Image: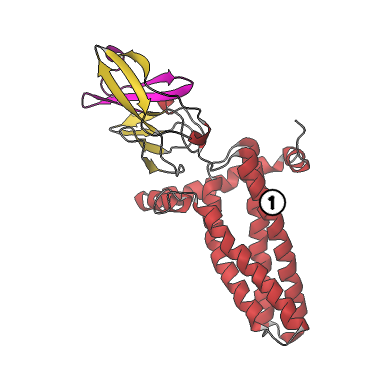
C-alpha cells in the first residue's frame, strides 16, 4: 500500500528524532520531579483517572470550536454591525486558555510515542503549539496595539485557524493511521465457550504465565491460591504483559509502564486508559479452562 504524502515527508525528516528525544525528556523529567503527585497528574492528563478515556481528544474540541467562533465573529463584526468586535476577542481567549490544557494533555500522550508514530505526533504538537502562539499574538495586538492593528490581528487569527485545521488532520492521521491511544484489546478476536489452557500445576503461585485461548493471548496469574486470567495484550499499545513485572496484584507493561490489576483487568496506571478483558477460570480434575467473562464484540 502506497504511503500518504504526509507519511513520506515525515520519514525524510531526520531532525525529528532529536526533537522527539528532547521533548520526551522534558515531559518525563517534569513528571518524575513531582514524584507521586506527578504520577497522579500524569494519569489525569492521559485520562486514565476520572475520565477513563483519552483526555486529549476530549479537550481539543473546545479550543477548535472557540477559535472557529472567534474568526467567524471577527468577520461578522467587520462586515456587519450585528456583532461587537469584542465577541471575537472573548472567543479567542477561551480558545487559548483551553488550548493550554489540551497541549498539556497532548504532550503527556506524546511521551509514550515511538518511531514513525512519534514523528507524526511531533508534527501535530508543533503545529498546534504554533497555533497557540499565533492566537496569543492576535490577542496581544487587539488589547495593546490599538484599533489600527485590528485587521492584522484578525488575519493572524485566520492563519491560526487554518493551522489548527491542518493540525487536526495530522492528529486524526495519528489516531486512525497509527492507532495512538486506541484501545488495542478492541482488535482481539476472542473465542467462544470454555477453552482448556493447561494443567493446574503449570501455574505456580505468584508467577505470570502466557497461554493462548483460541487465538487470544491470555495472562494467567495465581494469587492467594486462586488462578486469575486477563488479556495479555496491553490496551495502550499492545505490549506483552507477561514480559512485564508483577508487584502483588498489579502487572506493569514492559513497553510504556501501564499498570493493571491481574484479578479484574482494571487499569491502575497510565498511559493506558482502558481496562483489560477479564476471563473466568475453572480448575477441575487438575485441568484449567478459561472463558471470556464478557463478549469482546
Residue at point 44%, 37% (across, down): 257
Determine the image quadrant of residue 129. bottom right
**Residue 14 visible in the shown view:** yes
How many numbered marks appear?
Answer: 1
Residue 172 screen position, x and y as percent? 64, 48
Majority secondary structure in the magenta region? strand
Q: Is residue 119 above or below residue 282?
A: below
**Position in image of residue 125 (x %, y %):** 63, 52
In the image: residue 203, left or right of residue 14: left
Foreground residue, 189 or 40? 189
| Residue bounds of the magenta highlight | 200-229
Q: Is residue 225 magenta?
A: yes
The residue at 52%/61% (across/down) is 101
125 relative to 58 in the view: left or right: right
Which quadrant does the N terminus fall into? top right
Asked whether 39 or 195 is in front, the reply is 195
Using the rendered image of the protein, determine whether residue 237 is visible from the camera's viewpoint.
Answer: no
Report x, y in % for residue 67.
Answer: 65, 68
| Residue name at image x 41 percent, y 53 percent | 41
Residue located beneath label 1 in the image: 169
Q: Residue furthest left?
A: 224
* x then y, percent, for residue 236: 49, 38
Q: Is residue 62 magenta?
A: no
Residue 180's place in the image compared with 263, above or below, is below
Quarter location, residue 13:
top right
> Which residue is at 40% across, 20% downward?
210
Q: Nearer the viewer, residue 131 or 297?
A: 297
Q: Circle 1 — which element? A: helix
Amino acid at each position: 500500500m502506497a504511503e500518504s504524502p504526509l507519511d513520506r515527508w515525515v520519514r525524510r525528516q531526520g531532525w525529528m528524532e532529536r526533537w522527539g528525544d528532547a521533548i520526551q525528556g522534558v515531559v518525563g523529567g517534569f513528571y518524575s520531579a513531582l514524584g507521586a503527585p506527578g504520577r497522579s497528574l500524569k494519569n489525569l492528563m492521559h485520562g486514565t483517572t476520572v475520565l477513563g478515556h483519552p483526555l486529549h481528544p476530549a479537550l481539543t474540541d473546545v479550543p477548535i470550536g472557540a477559535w472557529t467562533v472567534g474568526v467567524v465573529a471577527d468577520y461578522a463584526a467587520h462586515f456587519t454591525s450585528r456583532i461587537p468586535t469584542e465577541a471575537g476577542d472573548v472567543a479567542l481567549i477561551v480558545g487559548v486558555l483551553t488550548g493550554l490544557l489540551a497541549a498539556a494533555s497532548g504532550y503527556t500522550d506524546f511521551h509514550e510515542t515511538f518511531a514513525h508514530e512519534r514523528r507524526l505526533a511531533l508534527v501535530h504538537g508543533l503545529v498546534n503549539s504554533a497555533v497557540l502562539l499565533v492566537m496569543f499574538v492576535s490577542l496581544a495586538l487587539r488589547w495593546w496595539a490599538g484599533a489600527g492593528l485590528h485587521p492584522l490581528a484578525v488575519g493572524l487569527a485566520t492563519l491560526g485557524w487554518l493551522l489548527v485545521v491542518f493540525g487536526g488532520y495530522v492528529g486524526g492521521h495519528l489516531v486512525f493511521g497509527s492507532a495512538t491511544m486506541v484501545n488495542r484489546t478492541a482488535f482481539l478476536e476472542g473465542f467462544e465457550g470454555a477453552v482448556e489452557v493447561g494443567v493446574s500445576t503449570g501455574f505456580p503461585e505468584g508467577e505470570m504465565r502466557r497461554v493462548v485461548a483460541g487465538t487470544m493471548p491470555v495472562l494467567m496469574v495465581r494469587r492467594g491460591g486462586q488462578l486469575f486470567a486477563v488479556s495479555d495484550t496491553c490496551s495502550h499499545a499492545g505490549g506483552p504483559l507477561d514480559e512485564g513485572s508483577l508487584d502483588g496484584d498489579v502487572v506493569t507493561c514492559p513497553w510504556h509502564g501501564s499498570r493493571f490489576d491481574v484479578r479484574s483487568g482494571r487499569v491502575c496506571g497510565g498511559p493506558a486508559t482502558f481496562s483489560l478483558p477479564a476471563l473466568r477460570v475453572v480448575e477441575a480434575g487438575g485441568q484449567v479452562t478459561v472463558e471470556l467473562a464478557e463478549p469482546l464484540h
